[in-house]
Each structure stands twice: as structure tokens, then as C-alpha cells.
Image: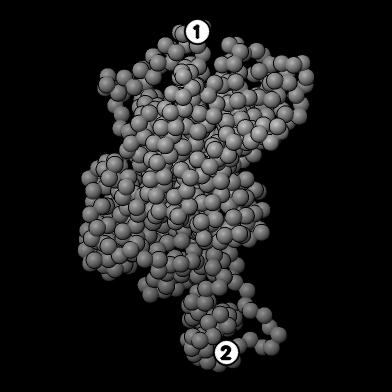
Amino acid sequence: MRLPGLVRTLAPALLLATATLLAHASALRGDFIWDDDANVSHNEALRSIDGLRRIWLEPGTTTQYYPLLYTTFWGLYRAFGDEPTGYHSLNWLLQALNALLLWRVLVRLGVPGAWWGAALWALHPVAVESVAWITELKNLQSGAFALAAALAFARFDEARERGASGALPFGLALVAFAAAVASKTVTATLPGALLVALWWKRGRLRARDFAAVVPMAAVVAPLAFLTVGAEARLGENRGFEWAPDFTEQLLVAGRALWFYAARLLWPHPLGFVYPRFEVDPSSARDWLAPLAALAVVAAALAVRHRTRGPAATLLFYGGMLLPALGFLEIYYFRFASTADHWQYLAAIGPCALAGAGLARLRPPAAQRAVGVAVLVVLGSLTFARARVFASSETLFADSLTAWPDSVMARYNLAVLVERRGDDEAAERHYREVLERQPGHLRALNNLGLLALRHGRGQEALALLGEATRRSPVYVEAYWNLGTALERLGRPAAALRAYRRSLAIDPRAALHTLGRGAFEGVGRAHLHVASLLVRSGHAEQAIPYYENALRLEPGLAAAYLQLGVVRARLGQRDAAIALLREAARLAPDDPRPRRHLARLGVAPRPASGAGPAAPPAATVAPGARGARQ
């Protein structure tokens, strides 16, 4: 008797987990894609024990201050290195875990059709972006902790209703919530979602309900502050301006709500990058979306005495989407107004409502038939959708097929085809980007580099000059403008552009013609120093050489050139020390020994002497006060 009972208990869980894993199985074959390099494959913080310390104690070490997320990435890098399958496997398993957690949360809250609601959410194609994209481990990990927090909070509320203290489940809820926020700050909306759930359950909220979520707000406040600051700095450092007024934000939010709802109701076509909404406050048509959204909420609230389900669903959905509706300064909003992964947790509300509706179907055989049919369709769409995430190029190409007006998708596809050497296709895509968005800074910059690479110097100057005019802090555009000017025989103008670039960000790892000629952060300073020497300004070059060695201490060419400059200026002892260090760092290069011979000294330091210390740290002229 006990075994069949156990089977009846475990069977729904096994069925839900298995269906989720099968639907998302094709995601396991994907490669690293867009943004995975910054977060994982090229993230230096994952490569050392000290990196783990910096993840927690030095905000700015990672793109966002999500310390628990990057701790997980740190552990995954120890286990799998640059092999993406291990990372995909964790995402895949977490989606199954989240489905099970959601099911138990809905059961605990007493939501009808809890299993159906969890299955609809887990198998829905809009979840694919969170599961198949390694970077979106932050959605899955934060979601797991948020759902665990909701489950513990529900138990705490039940204990209070019985007259018990509920201290243990409340403590667990608080710890799980802190872990969720440390994985992704967007889970800061959970306290509001819990209040909506309590209102749906009882029809009213009491003072003690609000008091229960106050500690959660205290947990999230400092992390939310760090996240908002990181997003603002990200935009500034990349030279983008984005400052819509509140009216425009309201119009974008209205359109975004309907866009997200449409993707849930009819998940085709989906896209990795959707077009950015352009709104006009003077257009009556643009006001229809937010007004209609408010009208639907008002209608749902008007019937709340008969049924609270629709109102609770709408309040939950809008509240969970709130950070992604355009009111906050998020870097991604400069390119697109919506993204599938932003409604990962918000989709729980509509899916739970749909599950409750499905549970009302009679007879039960009809309920099962309809439910299974819907899940088979959703699972099949999910399996097919996950295959699109095989590579960045297939992903952006698919987005353009579905949404040809997406500037961001077209720009990123241009970058990818340029990297594999198809300059003609890349130029065509860049020009289409500029047709749709004439001020697109990176398209101007990259098209200017292409023009220069193919011998169209004047065109390159025009494009790069336009990029610097549009953004006075666009580091790469100033550097590339200097490259163009140098190629066209205008060294003085080139130096001004180079110096401006390094004044904006002395640590920028810059590249010549987009081909990665500068692989270290010190080589840009070395290049400027060399050009100053060739232009007859050797003394002005010294601070740049010293910066190159401060930023890249093993740069043998900087020791060599600075040693030669010191020798010309009559600083013999300093020159000898520098040239000997150059000879030590580059033993196969004969030039340091030749210069040492001209000074009449041995090529190597005396026995027991250590390497020459790098010059004292300086800041290149014009770089003082620059953003580091």
C-alpha cells in the first residue's frame, strides 16, 4: 500500500521534470553566444581565487554586481573551462527544478490546476531564451531562489494563521530571497508578488502582511542601488545617451505590456532581439496601449468580489514586469524595448491562471486531452526554438527573419560576418543599420574601419568623425580616427585623437582596424609614445611609455623603446636598466643587446641582480581625472 501511494505522489513530479527536460533538450548543443564572452568565456574574474574575492568585494569586477551568480560561474569555470555543454546542463536542470518548485508553490497557495500551470510555464517557448542562453543562468538561479523563498513564505503565512510564530520558515524565506537578489536584482519585485498572492488568497491585506515583507525590502535596497549604478556606467562608458522623459516611458511601457502578453498567447514569431519601440506623445494612437492596459486592470478589479483570479494575475504580471517596462535606465533599452527573458518569472501569473481554467474543464478526460495537446504543442515549439541558439550567427539571422527592423540584431549579425572575413556582407548590414538609425555609433565606427581597411581613407574620416561628434566619450571612435589620420599622413592630428581616446579611458584595450593588433592594455600607450618619438617629441613620449609598462609590465618593446629614448636624452644608467630588462624579456630579439653594446656595457645584469623595476606609475598628459 505504501509503494503505490509513493508512486502517486512522485509520478506528477517525475512527469513534470521529464517533460521539461525533453522540451529543452536541444539547448544542450548550443555554443557560447552574445554576452557569454563578457560573463564567462572572457571573464578574467573566473580564472583565479582572487577573482572570487573581487566578485564579492569589488563592484565593477563583473558587468553587474550579482555576486552569487558569478560565484556559480566561477565554480562552473573550474569544472568545465571553455566547454559550453556543462554550463548549458546546469541551466537545463535548473529549469526542471524551477518547474517543480513552482508546482509546489501553487499547491501551497491553493491555486487550482497547479500542475497544469507549472507545466504550461516550464514548457512555454518564451522560457527558451532563459534556458538556452548561458548568460541567463541569472534568470534560472535567481528564479530558483525566489520560488524557494515564496514556498517558505507561504509556509510562514500558514504558521501565522495557526497562531504559531513561523520564525524558521520566515528565516528561510529571507535567506532564499537574499540569494535570489544576489543572483539577479530583478527579483526585488518578489515582496510585491507575495502581497498579491496573499490578497488573492484572503481578499484583504493586513498590517502584519506588509510588515512581513519589510525585511525583504531592506535586503534588496543596497543591491538595487548597485545595479542601477552599474547600468548607468555601462551606458556612459560605451558612449550612449538615452534619456526619455516619463511620458515616453509610459507609452513604451504600455506597448511592452501588450507585446509580452501577445508572445504568451501566440508565441510566434519569437526573436532574440526585438525592435525598439518609437513612440510619439503627441499621437493619440500611441496612448491607446497604456490606456487599454489600465482599462483591463480596472475591469478585473471591478469583478474582484466575484473572482480575484484575473485581477491578481494582472497585478502579478505587471508588477513582475515593472523593472523591464522602460522606467529604469537599463543599458539594453538603448537597443530594444522587450526581451523574452524579461518575462521569465512574470509569465508565471498568466500560466497559473490558464492552468486554473484548464482544471475547470469537465469531464476530466476532456481536461486531460486538451491539457496534453497544449503541452505537446508548446513542448514541440520549445524544442525547435532552442535549436536556434546553436550560435550567435544563427540566432541573429533568425531574429532578422522574424523581425527585419531590429537594428540591434542587424548590427550584431554584421559584426559576426565581419569576424569571419565577409567584409562585403558586413558593410551591407552596417549600412542598413545606419539607414534605420543614422546615429548608430558602433555602426559608424565599424563602417569607418571597413572603409579604411579597403583604402577609402576620406570616407573613413567622415564616418569616424561623425561618431566622435555624436559622442565625445566614445573611446574606440577617437582611437580609430587617430588610426585613419595616421594612415593618411597626418601625425599631429592623429596624436590629438589618440590622446583624447586615452584621456577618456587610459585602460582601454584598443584595436587597430578591428583585427586585434593591440592585445594588451599597455600597447595603445606604447603606440602613442612611438608616434611622439617619430614626430620629434621624445620627452613627451616618456609618460606614455611609463603608462604602458604600468598597465602591461611584461611589455618588452616598451622597455626597449624607453631605454633608447633615455639613452638619447643622456640618462645612461636608466637606459641600461631598461635595455637589460628588454633583453631579459625578449632573449631572441637582438636589438636590446645592440643598444647596450653601443653604451659599452654587458647585455645582462650582474649575477644575483633582479630585473629592473618598472618605472614609477604616471598618468599620460590629458588623462588626469579620466574614468578608470
Please identify the quarter of the rendering in which residue 463 is found.
bottom left
Q: Determine the residue positioned at 59% across, 36% down.
A: 11
Left-right relation of 620 to 254 = right
Badge number at residue 541: none
Vertical arrangement, residue 204 with respect to residue 485, above or below: above
Q: Secondary structure at mark 2?
A: loop
Give percent across and percent down for residue 503. Answer: 45, 56
Give the amino acid at mark 1.
Arg
Looking at marks 1 and 2 on the same chain, the residue that comes earlier in the sequence is marked by 1
Q: Determine the residue positioned at 38% across, 28% down.
A: 265
Left-right relation of 510 to 455 = right
Give the amino acid at mark 2.
Pro
Label 1 to label 2, Cα distance in Å? 92 Å
Vertical arrangement, residue 244 with respect to residue 47, above or below: above
Q: Nearer the viewer, residue 474 or 494?
A: 474
Please identify the quarter of the rendering in which residue 512 is found.
bottom left
Q: Residues within 10 Å of mark 2 (few under 14, many from 20)?
A: many
Of the residues tagged 1 and 2, which is closer to the observer? 1
Give percent across and percent down for residue 492. Answer: 33, 65
Q: Nearer the viewer, residue 306 or 456?
A: 306
Q: Determine the residue positioned at 73% across, 18% down.
A: 160
Quarter of the image with the N terminus is top right
Q: Secondary structure at mark 1?
A: loop
Q: Residue furthest front?
A: 1
Give percent across and percent down for residue 203. Answer: 58, 11
Residue, disc 1 = 306
Vertical arrangement, residue 315 with respect to residue 505, above or below: above
Give percent across and percent down for residue 189. Answer: 55, 29
Badge number at residue 603: 2
